[in-house]
Amino acid sequence: MITCVVEYTIDPAKTDDFERFARAWIALVDKHGGTHHGYFLPGEGASDRALALFSFESLAAYERYRALFDSDDEFRAANAIRDRSGCVLRYERTFMRPIFDGKLP
């Protein structure tokens, strides 16, 4: 299993747009074989940082999902929220290997 961690720099004045973008992507990840663990937005104070975490059973499964980005209308619509609003200033994607239980090896 792999977990994709996406670190966003967002426009704090466009948090509502970012939330619409996030909700669209949660649905897409879940629909296409992944498990979305949520988006995490600033809770208190001034911040322009947000995170997203979602997992796929393998890198190959993630790549099948990614292959839809330019060919599927739902993916294009989700990206249009970001592109039209300018809510995302930049982002960085990292792949991690998760541990979900407290069992010792």
Image: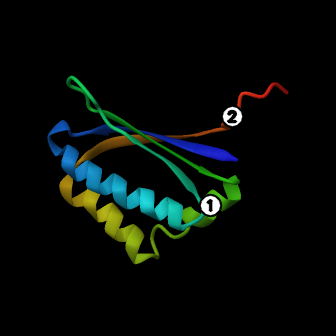
Compute the Cα span from label 1 to label 2.
Answer: 21 Å
Nearer-the-camera pick, 36 or 60: 36
Q: Looking at the image, which is closer to me, 80 or 98?
A: 98
Q: Is residue 8 above or below residue 33?
A: above
Residue 99 circle label: 2
Q: Taking 87 as reference, is 65 left or right?
A: right
Residue 8: image x %, image y %?
36, 39
Number of callouts: 2
N-terminal label among 1 and 2: 1
- Callout 2: SS: loop
Packing grade of label 2 (10 A; few <14, some 14-19, many >=20) is few
Task: Rate crowding at label 1 as few (under 14), some (14 to 19) or many (20 or more) other CA atoms within 10 Å.
Answer: few
Q: Quadrant of residue 74?
A: bottom left
The residue under the point 39% across, 76% down is 73
Q: Amino acid at mark 2?
A: Ile
Q: Secondary structure at mark 1?
A: helix
x, y percent for residue 69: 47, 67
Q: Residue furthest right?
A: 105
Residue at coordinates 32% horizontally, 37% vertically from top-left? 41
Q: Quadrant of residue 105?
A: top right
Residue of label 1 = 63
52 sits left or right of 24 in the view: right
Residue type indicated by callout 1: Glu
State which mark lies toward you, 1 or 2.
2
